[in-house]
Amino acid sequence: MHSRGAELRRIPRKRRYLALLLPVAALCLVSAMLGSGCGKKGETLSVPDYRKRVSEIHDGVAWDLSYVLESLTEVSGDEYYHLQAIGEVFSQAQEIFSGAYRSLDALNPPEEALDLHLELMRFYADGERETGVVINSLGLFQILLPMLVDVDNLALPSLGEQPQPQDIRAAAEEDGRTMEEYLRELEGISPPEELQDYLERARGLFRAVKDMVSGVLQAAPTKEPESLADFRQRFAPVAGEAADLRNTVQAYLEGVGGRIDELIERGRELAARIKGL
């Protein structure tokens, strides 16, 4: 017997890329504040020369970032296999911020521009960190979304109204293996702190389904129909929780725009300060 859930699980999944990124910019920022920096600096620039060099760096960030983020409008977040494409967009944005940080760190600013220089470095470091958080979050969603979609396609809920006892047991065994597989796949994952509760909710959902399936498997012979009826009654709220977790992904993606807008606004304010230097 092959359920719809079994068919869905045979679809190859994208490879994980949830490894947490070490923010090099944050390490460089500490060094810069201590006066050592991350690169070899030349002689102190004059104010006009510094303004010219920094304007080129900052204008380049604004141009490149706007171009990269425009591509987000071409990608849909409605399905989990689109998340990799979104992650690639943010990887490009992260490279823009880290590249700007390195370029700025190579400059030796005049005394009049020290405060602005450090503020710019904080901005580029924050941009690299924020995009890194988004990349890691998308990696988590890539792993979880196909699992959450599969909750609606499990073998037990897909059985007809009057299945045979052997079909009930076979479906329960299949769903039990599926939940064990999912829980194993989630072992050792360290998501961004803001998504730790989200991951725990997903783990709790899969444990709940596993326990419910165990109840069916432990039913006495000839009691399989009663155990299936009990499973179906308890499964309804679990399916609702899975749907809520899927909706959270879309809400997160919508919130990402606000995070980027904040960075863009900070960038505009810094551009005005550069011009006024």
Image (cartoon, grey):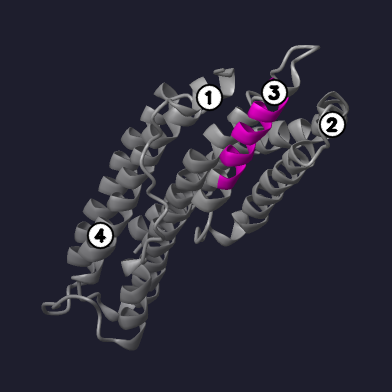
In the rendered structure, which segment of residues is drawn in magenta? Answer: 167-180
Quarter holding residue 219? top right
Question: Looking at the picture, how far across and down is residue 72, in whole percent?
Answer: 42, 30
**Labels 1 and 4: the sequence-earlier one:** 1
Question: Looking at the picture, how far across and down is residue 124, in whole percent?
Answer: 37, 60
Mark 3, residue position: 166
Marks 1 and 3, Cα distance to the nearest angstrom? 17 Å
- Using residue 140 as the reference point, say whether residue 17 is left or right of it: left
**Labels 2 and 3: the sequence-earlier one:** 3
Mark 2, residue position: 227
Q: Nearer the viewer, mark 3 or mark 4?
A: 3
**Labels 1 and 3: the sequence-earlier one:** 1
Marks 4 and 2, Cα distance to the nearest angstrom? 70 Å
- Using residue 172 as the reference point, say whether residue 270 is left or right of it: left
Identified at 44% across, 61% down, the residue is 126
Identified at 62% across, 52% down, the residue is 199
Residue type at numbered disc 1: Ala
Residue type at numbered disc 2: Ser
Q: What number is the disc on residue 54?
A: 4
Q: On screen, 240 above or below 136? A: above
Marks 3 and 4, Cα distance to the nearest angstrom? 72 Å
Residue 252 seen from this side: no
Identified at 24% across, 54% down, the residue is 57
Residue type at numbered disc 3: Gln
Residue 173 part of the magenta-drawn span = yes
Depth check, front residue: 108 or 181: 181
**Labels 4 and 2: the sequence-earlier one:** 4
Identified at 86% across, 25% down, the residue is 229
Residue type at numbered disc 4: Val
Q: Secondary structure at mark 3?
A: helix
Marks 1 and 4, Cα distance to the nearest angstrom? 56 Å
Q: Secondary structure at mark 4?
A: helix
